[in-house]
Image (cartoon, grey):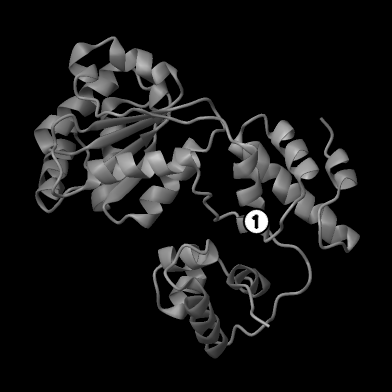
Amino acid sequence: MSVNLQKFIQANGLSMRSAAEAAGCDKSVIVKVCNQTYYEWQRKEADIIALLQEKGHTKMPSDQLSISTDVLVKTSNVDRFFQLADSLADPDGSLTSSLGMVIGTAERGKTYAARHYANKNPNAVYIQFIEGSSRCQVLRSICYQLTGCRPYSFGACVSALEEISRLGRRLVIVDEADKCPLSILEMLRGVNEVCQLPFLFVGEEALKGKMDAVPRLRSRVRNPIVVFDPLTISDVSVYWSMAAGLSLDQAMLEKLFRRARAGFRTLSNDALALVRIANASGINTITPAMLDTLGA
């Protein structure tokens, strides 16, 4: 009987990263195999499990349910996000209009997709804007992600970013960019031009209004702007299949969909809670009664 890699990793108390290190491969390979998107993933899954067993990780998965928090469901939202990010990060692509924008209501999965892309792509980095940050603090955060150092002054930060950009195209993803004051968005536009450094701004709908209000910002935004649509019942089904290995019936999917209110974060939190309830009950499936215990 074949062994599920995701459950094998969890049974041995490993993270995706530590499993990748033990198997001598990149974390992205482990994630793709678990998501069944790796070419000939079944063969690679068996190879990785054999390597992990050789390193002493021999505990086999039990019948208990498990949930993977590393799963990225390739929704149409995520596909559009990745296509835009790829175009900005492309070393042979144009740097004209090299400010990207991804917008959508909270909980749609924008942050998860942004972090996943940055972890997967060595030429992309992720920062989250913290309200109240100064221009220099923002640049120091970007420098740290790109170079491993935090220059003290604004000018030193710009010089460091110019230097790293000469070595190759790098993409900076700025999350919660809707909270950025216009002065910081303008500053990042200047860095984009001076350092030839593309940016991908991620935030709620207010971000578009801020960018549209300033022609020199709006004119540099690459089309298409990615708008994160609400989750669909199909997305819920795929999430449960990939994250927990379960095929839920239509009635259960509809209940989970209504509870999520189109939000990815609620869907994920509910999944974690339901799996804990199922395991505590000694049941290897999800029932309507379990869902009722979560309340409204």
Res 193 seen here: yes
Q: Quadrant of residue 15?
A: bottom right
On screen, residue 12 versus residue 98, left or right, reads: right
Q: Looking at the image, is 161 positioned above or below residue 180?
A: below
Q: Residue furthest front?
A: 250
In this figure, what is the number of numbered marks? Answer: 1
**Quarter of the rendering occupied by the N terminus:** bottom right
On screen, residue 7 versus residue 52, left or right, reads: right
**Percent x, y of residue 253:** 73, 43
**Percent x, y of residue 287:** 86, 50
Q: Residue furthest bottom?
A: 54
Question: Which residue appears at 11% of the width and 40% of the height?
Answer: 159
Q: Residues within 10 Å of mark 1 (few under 14, many from 20)?
A: some
Comparing 124 with 161, the one in front is: 124
**Percent x, y of residue 117:** 39, 49
Q: Say which element carries label 1.
A: helix
Q: Looking at the image, is 271 positioned above or below residue 4?
A: above
Res 150 seen here: no
On screen, residue 166 versus residue 47, left or right, reads: left
Q: Which residue is mark 1?
A: 241
Q: Looking at the image, is 132 positioned above or below residue 25?
A: above
**Quarter of the rendering occupied by the C terminus:** top right
Comparing 80 with 183, the one in front is: 80
Comparing 241 with 102, the one in front is: 241
**Percent x, y of residue 30:** 48, 68
Question: Which residue appears at 62% of the width and 43% of the height?
Answer: 234
Question: Which residue appears at 71% of the width and 58% of the height?
Answer: 246
Three-letter amino acid code at the position of disc 1: Ser
Q: Quadrant of residue 143?
A: top left
